[in-house]
Image (cartoon, rainbow, N blue to C red):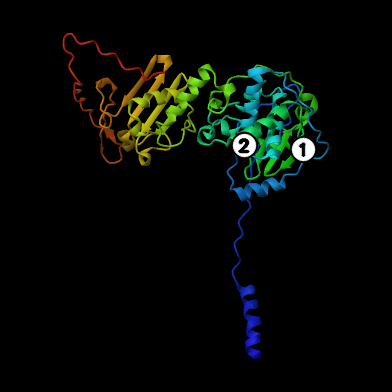
Amino acid sequence: MGAIALGAVALPSWLVTHAPPIPVRPRAKVRLPRPRVVPPAEVPAVEPVDFVALDPAEARAFNESVPFVTGPNPPARPFRLAATGEDRARAIDCLAAAQLYEAGDDTTGERAVAQVVLNRLRHPAFPKTVCGVVFQGSERSTGCQFTFTCDGALAAHGWADAAWKRARQVAELMLGGQVYKQVGYATHYHTDWVVPYWQSSLDKVAAVGSHLFFRWTGWWGTPPAFRRTVSTSEPVIAALAPYSDAHRTGAALDEAEGALAAAAVLGTDTPRPQPDDENSFVVTLNAKAGPDSFAALAQRLCGARSYCKVLGWTDKAKTPHFLPLKPDQIASMGFSFLRDRERQLEKSLWNCRQFPRSNPPECMKQQVFVPASEGEPLKPAPAAAPEPPTLSGVRRRGEPTPVPAPSATP
């Protein structure tokens, strides 16, 4: 029995002293830009939202290592929006949307988000309207200040009427002079599981739930910097038209309804421009929506861009993620759209093997890629002449002239 007892003690001791060392994961190196204090004579630039490549655990560890700024964190002065009627209603709904999509149906988080929006509203680095602040940069895939405005969240996820009502009540109170003191004059925030590059030049002032709040370092983060006169003329935001009566007017309603109709043409989520080319879209199309709908979709995706490309596939497995395209991706493409207003060019083309067209100029040139000599790239074979279109009918004498179908171009 004594030998057994001795072994029970000695064996674990030997394993502890002779076991190979457990590898320790090296701490991630976070390289942020050098801090810069913007002088009072220079309005600070509003940086796009760009994150350091860290997993959530590494980001949390880094964020915990960043100390809160010392010294006072004065609450913001009360703000009361002077706008009335439709302008006030638009401001309330823009602020309510920001609260809900950024903080969820949580009153405390919503008040903190609303305070940041109002701080930005009174700071000369940002737009002069509530809706302008919330939707700043939303027309770009990598420039929006609040991600819900450009990542498809508005179209993909709605809120219950009760949550929307509560958010509007919070927005009305904040626009009527209520202050969320804890975040002070913060103009930036992020969740604790990410690290944005702009963090290095701002002071960390507060934490609310999983969100960390920051203000500009130096004079631009002090109360005197937040005295800009705001505008009471709020813009109409088409993306809010399905949810807001105040934004459901005229062209905004048409654009919103068109966007919802265009979404039905897609086989996947609402697409965003290519990461390195804001004028190019690669999409998976819904073949059941009908080929004529593809041109309307391209027009809506391109919006007001003077130069734009939309490339579409009906098979999600064949839809590329990035440009340039490979030969097999070109061959399987179902639709393309090109707009170049400088050259006065705007053209939609279909793969007529997939979607027969009665007008041959609307067909893509079919390219079959054949192997070249070893070491040389693939070369396209000569394009075959398009097959003559099949007549859809014959109009006899005395019959009325057919009325052309409505154009797909809005």
Q: At which x and y percent is residue 199?
A: 68, 37
Q: Residues within 10 Å of mark 1 (few under 14, many from 20)?
A: some
Identify residue type, mark 2. Ala
Looking at the image, which residue is at 73% across and 29% down? 173
- Residue 397 placement: quadrant: top left
Q: Which residue of the protein is positioned furthest toward the top in this rendering?
A: 398
Query: Residue farthest to the right?
Result: 71
- Of residues 259 and 247, the one nearer the viewer is 247
- How crowded pointer 2 is (Cα within 10 Å; few <14, some 14-19, many 20+) is rated as some
Element under disc 2? helix
Residue 256 higher or lower than 182, as above or below: above
Of mark 2 and mark 1, the one earlier in the sequence is 2
Helix, strand or loop for disc 1: helix
Which residue is tagged 2? 163
Q: Is residue 403 in sight in this rendering?
A: yes
Residue placed under numbered mark 1 in the picture: 182
Residue 138 in which image quadrant: top right
- The residue type indicated by label 1 comes to Gln
